[in-house]
Amino acid sequence: MKRLLIIIDGMDDEPVAVLGNRTPAQYADMEALTFMREHGSRQYVRSVPEGVEPATDTALLTQLGYRITPDFCSRAWLEALGNGINPGPADLCLRCNLINHDGQRLISHSAGHPGKVETKAYVEMLETIADERFTVYDTGSYRSLLVIHNTPAQIYSIPPHKIIGSSLDFLKVSGTDKKTTDTINRFITEARSLPAVGEINGIAIWGAGRAFIPAFTIAGAVVTAVPVVKGIAKAVGMEVIEVNGATGDASTDYEAKLQAAIKAFDVHDFVLLHIEAPDEASHARNPIEKVRILHDIDNRILRPLLDISMPLQITVQADHGTSSVTGCHLAIPVEQIRYNSHLMYY
């Protein structure tokens, strides 16, 4: 039987006071998911091993069967790969979020989700102040990337979505090489002196990573708009299916993504459909928006699958939990629902 794995990024959450102490998924009244739960099977699974930071890369690789340890460090390298960048073996990759601040505190880790014209303009200015060892890459979203060439340094930082509302001092990085650390911190500070482009008026450097070498490959396809998921797919040998209208946020074309996933079964027996928007709403600490997004996903992705005539083993789960109260990923077991489409129809 063909297998469809639907990863709803950050779907699991904690109870929220403004939602009557229910989680966004409970408040959203996801009827199609409830039907799958009642006519299939459910269990709670640990999406990342104990001691491992809960994140899309560590969770998804764990769910695909890879052994991830607490020293795993490939996030930005996977994002680079997903963006068509091929870093050298001695290069260090880092996420370079385009942010918004008020001069004292971090306001937004994503600068209001700028468009491609805005990101290109700001990254071009970043290139003028970057160290000669740095290459800054515009990815068309707030998730730009920084590659430091030929360095053994390790860099440590706080994910910016964890420090929204906090002092800009928390954006400073630390590391094993003082010269590299000082250069990055100077780059972060100087970026704030550049002219703002829309809401973009600074950067956050984080998520350092080096090459991930998988122990085995996987046959299948991935439908996603998120670079780190594309990078995982490329690293493990899966086909990445590009979809017009897939954005990685609440504006994404759910119908086009579902159609692409179903079409992929013409060639593949396993397809992973990844949906990012709930995680973005959580990082913005917006549980009401997360409820709306989950309701959309239920109606536009899950409900049509209840009527599909193709025999499918469907698994629906979060990669990890994400709190819409704190904006942080949660190291909690996530609900995993399995439903066989040929056994029951809605």
Image: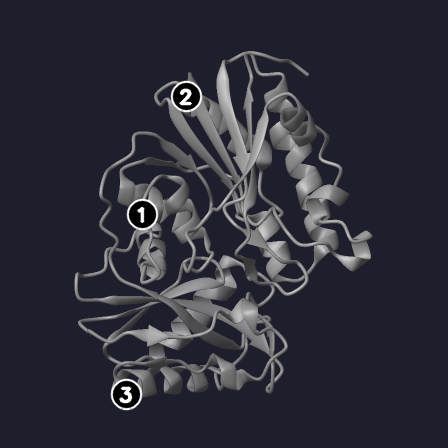
As drawn, the label of residue 67 is 1
* Residue 205 seen by the camera: yes
Under mark 3, the amino acid is Lys
Task: Please state the horizontal and vertical placement of residue 102, each as a whole percent of the image.
Answer: 63, 82
Under mark 2, the amino acid is Phe
Q: Quadrant of the C terminus?
A: top right
Looking at the image, which residue is at 26% across and 62% down?
A: 210
- Residue placed under numbered mark 3 in the picture: 178
Looking at the image, which residue is at 54% across and 83% down?
A: 168
- Residue placed under numbered mark 2 in the picture: 265
> Which structural element holds mark 3?
helix
Compare residues 173 and 87 and report the one nearer the observer.
Answer: 173
Is disc 1 in contact with disc 2, using a CB cutoff of under 8 Å? no
Foreground mark, 3 or 2? 3
Is disc 3 in contact with disc 2, using a CB cutoff of under 8 Å? no
Crowdedness of circle 2 by 10 Å Cα count: few (<14), some, many (20+)? some
Task: Please state the horizontal and vertical placement of residue 255, each as a whole percent of the image.
Answer: 58, 31
Foreground mark, 1 or 3? 1
Looking at the image, which residue is at 28% across and 87% down?
A: 178
Task: Please state the horizontal and vertical placement of residue 158, each as a whole percent of the image.
Answer: 47, 73
- Looking at the picture, does residue 338 appear above or below residue 209? above
Q: Sequence-wise, which precedes: disc 1 or disc 3? A: 1
Scheme of colours in the image: one colour
Under mark 1, the amino acid is Arg
Q: Quadrant of residue 336?
A: top right
Foreground mark, 1 or 2? 1
> Which structural element holds mark 2?
loop
Looking at the image, which residue is at 55% across and 65% down?
A: 110
Task: Please state the horizontal and vertical placement of residue 240, each as a whole percent of the image.
Answer: 36, 38
